[in-house]
């Protein structure tokens, strides 16, 4: 059996390029005692990948040149020499961008496909959903009646954050990069207002939609938009930094000039590293699947077929050409 | 009787200039029922003044053009038509940059000169001391054994922060802008290390002095120095923004490019607005005067004679030519 793998072949300067990856077909490694073989069905494309392509360590080590690109993937167990896992079970984890993975079981999550289709376990029931759930609830601590503002709101994290906030009784406003995405937020996700940051004056619209100021700001985007929202915080605001997708491909990271607004608002800025909540994932998966199955939340996917599409698909994330949780179907 | 007053005559662009102020001698206003007349002895020069000179409102309204410059001042009551205050008592408050003030008593603090000389009530026992005390203790929440890093450490706020942190059992490292100021931190204030940011490589020295990272960062300075410290946070760090004196006279405020380091460190960024703690000032004054009188803390003053020196003295704050709490003796 052969394994098709996406190999990190160069460290990008600025925007990710297709030439930063090689697609290789290699012999499948042997499954040793304690290990299991997984046939990967879906590979997730996540903004965090841009950081993983850099040298050095932030919260996690960069991928080594020549190694399989790190990725959250999900699939079915084909063979098991590990007593904790049975053939036919579905699992997800950092299994890499490849068609087969051999794992010792460490860091794997079982995917209960009665809670939702396998692809959801890489999206709303997977890492992005967990990031939304714990980032909003544990860090943002929204109270019913408060205004929650989400940037990158049409993304899988942003749309999940907004919908959880709605379930919790908040007013929810978000930004996205097209009218179609804004319609999705209003019509499918139940947002109270959506701002197309490419065509509208965000500061003006924010003041119109949130005259009481922003109590929880869940930021996926960074850049000047972060400054605009900081200038409109309500007293006691919580700013939750999840990501800064507008900046990952920039040579110089944009620093928020308005950070002192956090001080005058008596606010706090904090962040979410989802791995810190790994032991609590099951209760979040249960809660989200309950809301999904009850029709209180929706999720949108954009599935691209073929592992060789990985490099092109990843670029869509950063150009905003994606719409919905972006996945490769192997 | 005549009142000599410092009037805000122009809004500065960039650095404060002497021509932004007029010194005027005006007739003293009448003391009405419920009011008191204070003969001002000391006027405090504080970094916050730069913000007060701007138009618009942050945590407090900007001073109007043509009005007496807002200032913390302290003096003796000459006349009282307010039953709460007696002639001969010492008080401080936002009494303005002038030789006499008429007040209705609102917002005044009594200065107990048995706890320390009147000038201290504008420094270590006044607003800057309160800013240090509550900012460090309530926002920074330092634990014994942790490393506290202070920028602008030789200033009245910074030196007080560092000395409180030493009393609390922390390791304390700070930056200042001259070797004399660094010696003061080491020899008088008991800092464990001091870095001259003008002549030393702060990042390198910080890594040398704080190999375990910075658990509490009390920032008075902002600018690129803020980024350097953010890159060296310990896990769970608390970043307390007090001020950004390096930026108040800049046309464009510097935003910290390394703010995502707060996320990877699982830290928080918060700020201190001292007025929020006004009801708790007495316990802080008692505690600080106890430490001062027991020889556990020291304070340094730079007193300039003559109210007409106000504009020149204020500029010293921003050029770093001050050394110790800067005051005008009227």
Image (cartoon, coloured by chain):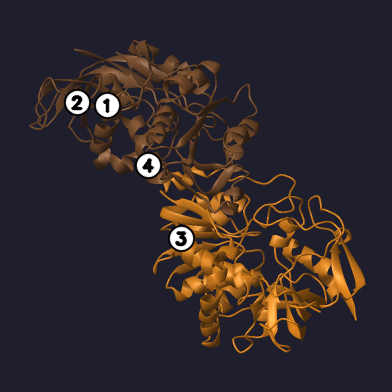
Chain colours: A orange, B brown
Distance Cα–Cα, label 1 vs label 3: 37 Å
Residue at numbered disc 4:
B137
* Labels 4 and 3 share a subunit: no
x then y, percent, for residue A304: 79, 77
Rendered-image quadrant of the C terminus of chain A: bottom right
Tag nearer the camera, 1 or 3:
1
Of B269 and B233, the residue lying toward us: B233
Label 1 SS:
loop
Rounded to the nearest angstrom, the CA distance separating label 4 from label 1 is: 28 Å
The residue that disc 1 covers is B95
Q: Confirm whether circles 2 and 3 share one chain.
A: no
The residue depicted at 58 percent of the width and 67 percent of the height is: A131
User: Is there a contact, CB below 8 Å, between mark 1 and mark 2?
Assistant: no
Whole-percent x, y for residue A35 in the image: 75, 77
Please determine whether, in this image, residue B140 is positioned above or below residue B47.
below
Which mark is nearer the camera, 4 or 3?
Answer: 4
Residue A309, position as x, y percentages in the image: 84, 72
Quarter holding the N terminus of chain A is bottom right
Whichever of callouts 4 and 1 sits on the residue coming sooner in the sequence is 1
Q: Which residue is mark 3?
A: A210
**Element type where label 3 sits in the image:** loop
Q: Nearer the viewer, residue B78 or B159?
A: B159
Q: Is residue A216 left or right of residue B135?
A: right
The chain to which mark 4 is attached is: B
Residue name at image x 37 percent, y 45 percent: B138
Nearest the eye: B79 or B238: B238
* Residue holding disc 2: B112
**What's the distance in space between the residues labelled 4 and 3, CA to CA?**
33 Å
Label 4, residues with CA under 10 Å away: few <14, some 14-19, many ≥20? some
Disc 2, SS: loop
């Amino acid at each position: 059996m052969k394994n098709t793998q996406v190999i990190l072949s160069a460290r990008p300067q600025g925007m990710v390029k297709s030439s930063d990856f090689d697609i290789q077909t290699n012999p499948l490694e042997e499954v040793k005692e304690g290990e299991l073989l997984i046939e990967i069905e879906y590979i997730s494309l996540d903004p965090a990948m841009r950081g993983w392509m850099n040298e050095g360590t932030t919260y996690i080590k960069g991928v080594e040149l020549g190694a399989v690109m790190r990725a959250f993937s999900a699939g079915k167990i084909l063979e098991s020499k590990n007593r904790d896992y049975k053939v036919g079970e579905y699992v997800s984890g950092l299994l890499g961008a490849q068609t087969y993975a051999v794992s010792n079981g460490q860091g794997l999550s079982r995917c209960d496909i009665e809670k939702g289709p396998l692809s959801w376990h890489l999206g709303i029931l997977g890492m992005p959903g967990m990031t939304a759930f714990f980032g909003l609830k544990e860090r943002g601590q929204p109270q019913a009646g408060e205004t929650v503002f989400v940037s990158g709101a049409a993304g899988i994290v942003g749309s999940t954050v907004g919908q959880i906030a709605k379930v919790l009784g908040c007013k929810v406003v978000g930004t996205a990069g097209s009218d179609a995405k804004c319609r999705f937020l209003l019509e499918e996700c139940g947002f109270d207002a959506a701002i197309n940051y490419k065509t509208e004056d965000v500061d003006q619209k924010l003041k119109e939609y949130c005259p009481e100021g922003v109590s929880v700001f869940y930021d996926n985007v960074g850049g000047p938009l972060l400054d605009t929202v900081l200038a409109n915080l309500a007293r006691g605001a919580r700013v939750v930094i999840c990501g800064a997708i507008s900046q990952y491909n920039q040579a110089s990271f944009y620093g928020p000039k308005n950070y002192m607004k956090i001080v005058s608002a008596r606010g706090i800025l904090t962040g979410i590293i989802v791995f810190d909540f790994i032991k609590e994932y099951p209760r979040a998966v249960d809660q989200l699947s309950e809301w999904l199955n009850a029709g209180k939340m929706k999720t949108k996917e954009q599935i691209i077929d073929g592992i060789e599409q990985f490099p092109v698909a990843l670029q869509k994330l950063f150009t905003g050409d994606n719409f919905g949780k972006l996945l490769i179907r192997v």
